[in-house]
Amino acid sequence: MPLPRRIQHCRVCGAATAYRIPPDDNRERAICSACGEIHYENPLNVVGTVPVWGDQVLLCRRNIEPRFGFWTLPAGFMELGESTAEGAIRETAEEAGANIELLELFTMLNVVRVGQVHFYYRARMCDLTLAPGPETIEARLFREDEIPWEELAFRTVRQTLEHYFADRRAGNFALHVGDVS
Ligand SMILES: [Zn+2]
């Protein structure tokens, strides 16, 4: 599958890059036409939570692109210097202002098309405190029959919610690993 050629300019000197296969490599990289810097690109991790209060799940309505105005679980790009669990807690605090107790890793979903891996942890809300950050229009709790399935922002969110409600009905939560096209 051809990947997008995202790097147009060198991150070191600013000159134009060209995609070529470096010596002793086996795939195209953005190589600087001036200084020769090779720009390696690798998948990014997205970390988030399924915050639960009783029989309700917390969703956030996005105040940013992509998918402005659509509903998502709190999640975002992992930062350097933190673990996946720490990132999931941080994103939940930043996007929803929710205090959570993190539980087990629940889904690990490859999104090969965009070069991402999404990790969602189950989480228990400690209280009903919500203080959405600037990336969120509103944060609110939904029972299963209230979930806005047609207004979810991402397929990984849909899959994670589908697994969550199916596991809850079965009375047993397991780790789900899969690929999203
Ligand atoms: Zn350069």
Image (tube, rainbow, N blue to C red):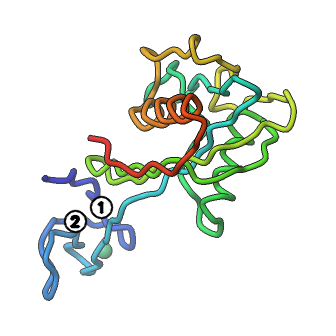
Using the image as rendered, state which of residue 158 and residue 168 is in the foreground. Answer: 168
In the drawing, what numbered circle is on residue 52? none
**Is residue 166 shown above or below 70?**
below
Which residue type carries mark 2? Thr
Residue in the picture at 50% in, 21% down: 70
Residue designated by label 2:
17
Q: CA distance from mark 1 to mark 2?
A: 5 Å
Report crowding for label 1: few under 14, some 14 to 19, many 20 or more residues within 10 A (C-alpha). some
Front residue of this view, candidates 55 and 152: 55
When the figure is inspected, residue 60 is found, relative to residue 120, above or below; the finding is above
**CB of residue at label 2: within 8 Å of ligand 1?**
yes
Extreme residue in the bottom direction: 24
- Left or right: 77 with respect to 154? right
Q: Quadrant of residue 124?
A: top right
Q: Position of residue 22 (x, y in %)?
A: 15, 80
Disc 2 secondary structure class:
strand
Q: Which residue is mark 1?
A: 9
- Quick check: 154 left or right of 173? left
Q: Are marks 1 and 2 in contact (CB under 8 Å)?
A: yes
Along the horizontal axis of the image, is 3 left or right of 168? Answer: left
Which quadrant holds residue 33? bottom left
Within 10 angstroms of label 2, few (less than 14), some, or many (20 or more) residues?
A: many
